[in-house]
C-alpha cells in the first residue's frame, strides 16, 4: 500500500471519519479534549491546499493518514491516524518515513509533533521511531503540561 497525497478538491468525508474514529480512544483520557473535535471538511480541504495530507488506502477508503505542515526549520506532523483494524501493521511508521523523506526534500532538519501527556503508549511508539521529548506545553487555562513536543532529527540535511 503506497501513500498518496490528498488533493484539496476531493471529498474528504471518509478522511474526517477515519480521524474521528481513530482518535475516539482518547475520549475521557485527555484533558482538554482533542482538537479533532474542531476539525471540519473545510479545515481538511484548506490543509490539503496550503500544506500536505497523505493517506494510505485499502479498497479506495483511507485506513491511515498524516497531516504535514511546513515550518521554518521543521516539518510538523499532525493528525497521524490509523484505522483500529489496520494497527500494528507498520502504517504509522510508513507515514513517518514518508514525512522524513518530505522533510529531506524540503531541506528541513527535523520532524516535530505533539502528543498529549496522558498518551504514554504514543510516546513509546514515537520513541521507537527515533523521536525524543524536547518540551512541554499547557493549553490555555491549564497550569500543568497537557502535551509534549517531540522531535526527530533528519539525517542527510544541514543541521542534522
Image (cartoon, grey):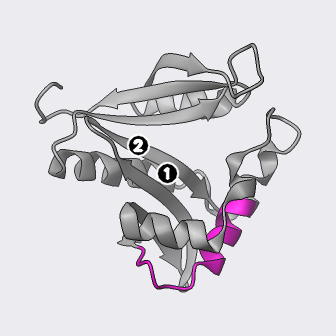
- The N terminus - image quarter: bottom left
Above or below residue 14? Residue 120 is above
Q: Mark 1 to mark 2: distance in Å?
A: 15 Å
Q: Nearer the viewer, residue 64 or 66?
A: 66
Residue 133 in percent (x, y) is at 49, 19
Disc 1 residue crowd, few under 14, some 14–19, many 20+, Cα 10 Å: many
Q: What residue is pinned by disc 1?
A: 92
Residue 118 in percent (x, y) is at 74, 27
Number of marks drawn: 2
Residue sitting farthest toward the right: 28
Above or below residue 146? Residue 108 is below
Q: Residue at x 58, y 28 (%)?
A: 123
Residue 76 circle label = 2
State which mark lies toward you, 1 or 2: 2
- Which tag, 1 or 2, sits closer to the chain's start? 2
Q: Is residue 105 magenta?
A: no
Q: Residue at x 13, y 35 (%)?
A: 157
- The C terminus - image quarter: top left
Q: Which residues are magenta?
A: 6-20
Q: Secondary structure at mark 2?
A: strand
Q: Is residue 159 left or right of residue 65?
A: left
Residue 79 in percent (x, y) is at 56, 52
Residue 12 in percent (x, y) is at 58, 78
Q: Residue at x 83, y 35 (%)?
A: 29
Q: Secondary structure at mark 1?
A: helix
Amino acid at each position: 500500500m503506497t501513500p498518496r497525497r490528498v488533493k484539496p478538491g476531493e471529498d474528504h468525508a471518509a478522511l474526517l471519519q477515519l480521524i474521528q474514529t481513530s482518535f475516539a480512544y482518547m475520549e475521557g483520557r485527555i484533558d482538554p479534549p482533542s482538537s479533532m473535535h474542531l476539525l471540519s471538511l473545510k479545515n481538511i480541504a484548506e490543509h490539503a491546499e496550503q500544506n500536505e495530507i497523505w493517506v494510505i488506502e485499502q479498497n479506495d477508503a483511507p485506513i491511515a493518514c498524516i497531516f504535514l505542515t511546513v515550518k521554518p526549520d521543521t516539518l510538523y506532523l499532525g493528525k497521524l491516524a490509523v484505522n483500529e483494524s489496520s494497527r500494528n501493521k507498520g502504517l504509522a511508521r510508513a507515514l513517518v518515513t514518508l514525512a522524513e523523506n518530505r522533510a529531506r526534500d524540503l531541506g528541513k532538519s527535523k520532524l516535530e509533533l505533539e502528543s498529549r501527556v496522558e498518551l504514554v503508549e504514543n510516546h513509546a511508539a514515537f520513541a521507537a521511531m527515533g523521536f525524543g521529548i524536547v518540551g512541554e506545553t499547557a493549553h490555555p487555562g491549564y497550569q500543568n503540561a497537557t502535551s509534549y513536543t517531540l522531535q526527530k532529527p533528519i539525517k542527510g540535511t544541514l543541521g542534522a
